[in-house]
Amino acid sequence: MNTKKIEHIGIAVKELAEKVYFYEEILGLKKLKEEIVEEQGVKIVFFQIGESKIELLEPLNEDSPIAKFIQKRGEGIHHFAILVDSIEDKIKDMQAKGAKLIGSKATRGADDMKIIFIHPKSSGGVLLELCEAIVKEE
Ligand code: ZN
């Protein structure tokens, strides 16, 4: 089985500070880390919730896909991420079966993951992300 669990749920927000306060202080989740991913134009904060995470995404600029998402649909759930053992195998397998992916190769995402997005047309209107943890060599 190459698919393991829902790794995280990505939520698009206009401004992190206020929402971080909600998730951390009011809901009581543990804040894991903060990260900027320039290529995707986002600032991200991760929270742990059981075996999964919540990923809050704030756009860094107007061109960010997250900014466009918020303009069109408002704040809210942006994607679900599914953890896989081998993202390369999964991409090959899904392409062979006709799934529509966004791009054809995994790229580097936040949280030391290799990621690729699956087009919502294939998955019932939900943007899905596949991710595989990058094992750090020390
Ligand atoms: Zn994500």
Image (cartoon, helix red, strand yellow):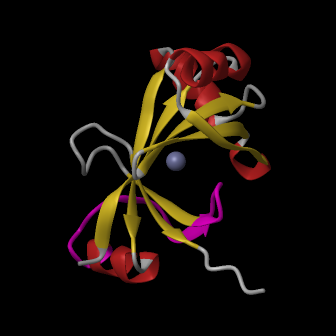
Number of numbered discs visible in the structure rendering: 0
How far across and how far down the image is residue 133, in percent?
54, 70
Q: Taking 16 as reference, is 2 above or below it?
A: below
Quadrant of the image containing the C terminus: bottom right
Q: Taking 119 as reference, is 138 above or below it?
A: below
Q: Residue at x 73, y 40 (%)?
A: 41
Front position in the image: 100 or 26: 26
What is the quadrant of residue 129 in the picture? bottom left
Front position in the image: 4 or 124: 4
Q: Residue at x 37, y 83 (%)?
A: 89
Q: Is 120 included in the stretch rendered in magenta?
A: no
Q: Residue at x 32, y 44 (%)?
A: 120
Front position in the image: 124 or 112: 112
Range of magenta residues? 95-113
Q: Taking 106 as reference, is 25 above or below it?
A: above
Front position in the image: 30 or 61: 30
How far across and how far down the image is residue 56, in percent?
58, 32
How far across and how far down the image is residue 83, in percent?
40, 63
94 sits to left or right of 106: left
Q: Residue at x 69, y 79 (%)?
A: 136
How far across and how far down the image is residue 12, in percent?
55, 27
Q: Taking 3 as reference, is 77 above or below it?
A: above
78 sits to left or right of 133: left
Quadrant of the image containing the N terminus: bottom left
What is the quadrant of residue 82 in the picture? bottom left
